[in-house]
Amino acid sequence: MARKSQSPDIHSPLEQTLFDITIRHLGKLDSYIPGPVKKAGKAKEELLQRYRQDPVFSIFGLDSAEYIAAALSGGTITSIHRKLGDIYENSVAAIFSHSLGLAAEDIRYSATIVVDDEAETRSIDAYLPFLRQAKKALDNLPSDSSVMHEKRDRISSSSTLSPIPRASER
């Protein structure tokens, strides 16, 4: 008996966003074609024939339908795991954005670093600009709080909005 698909019970815009992220990434698996099958012309039989003609695969008995199935399954599992990682990454960013009322571009951070004379860009899933958040919070305080005015002035006079210096500033 086939299982009946149920829609989730969504109660908030954040839940809808997280559901949409999940469906978008898992939906990509529907059109997934394992790399070895793509190279062999999108047919398992052609891939099996190529393995039978390969001296390394055939001499070790790796030219069987069982080996092909295992190899293709392994690639598929890896792709599923990568999509789960994408879901987690995008969900963390969505939760930060939603919970803190920040636009997506406000929580993005990347830096270009040099490794072995090669420039590489590194990024994080979600960046929380603490100083910007502190300034926003202080701006919302009652105007009659002299202690808060002093703290607000001290933070506002800070020239750095980021607790981590960007690579270009080092």
Image: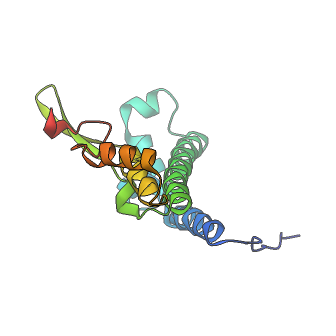
Q: Is residue 38 visible?
A: yes
Tally of numbered tags? 0
State the image coordinates of residue 123 (x, y, percent, origin top left): 33, 44
Q: Residue at x 61, y 42 (%)?
A: 66
Is residue 123 left or right of 5 when viewed as pictured? left
With respect to residue 169, does 125 lie above or below? Answer: below
Name the outermost residue toward the right: 1
Viewer-side residue, 41 vs 18: 18
- The quadrant of the picture occupied by the C terminus is top left
Which quadrant of the rendered structure holds the N terminus?
Answer: bottom right
Relative vertical location of residue 32 with respect to residue 92 in this rendering, above or below: below
**Where residue 133 appears, x then y in whole percent?**
42, 52
- Residue in view at x 39 percent, y 50 percent: 149
Nearer the observer, 73 or 147? 147
Using the rendered view, name the quadrant where residue 16 is placed: bottom right
Residue 143 falls in image quadrant: bottom left
**Left or right: residue 81 compared with residue 137:** right
108 horizontally vs 159: left or right: right
Residue name at image x 79 percent, y 73 percent: 6
Which residue sits at x=49%, y=63%? 101
Q: Quadrant of residue 104?
A: bottom left
Closest to the observer: 27 or 48?
27
Can you give x and y, in whole percent of width and height, for residue 5 in the image?
A: 78, 73
Q: Residue 114, position in %: x, y? A: 16, 31
In front of the other: 170 or 160: 160
Visible in this render: residue 125? Answer: no
How was this image coloured?
Answer: rainbow
Q: Is residue 149 above or below residue 18?
A: above
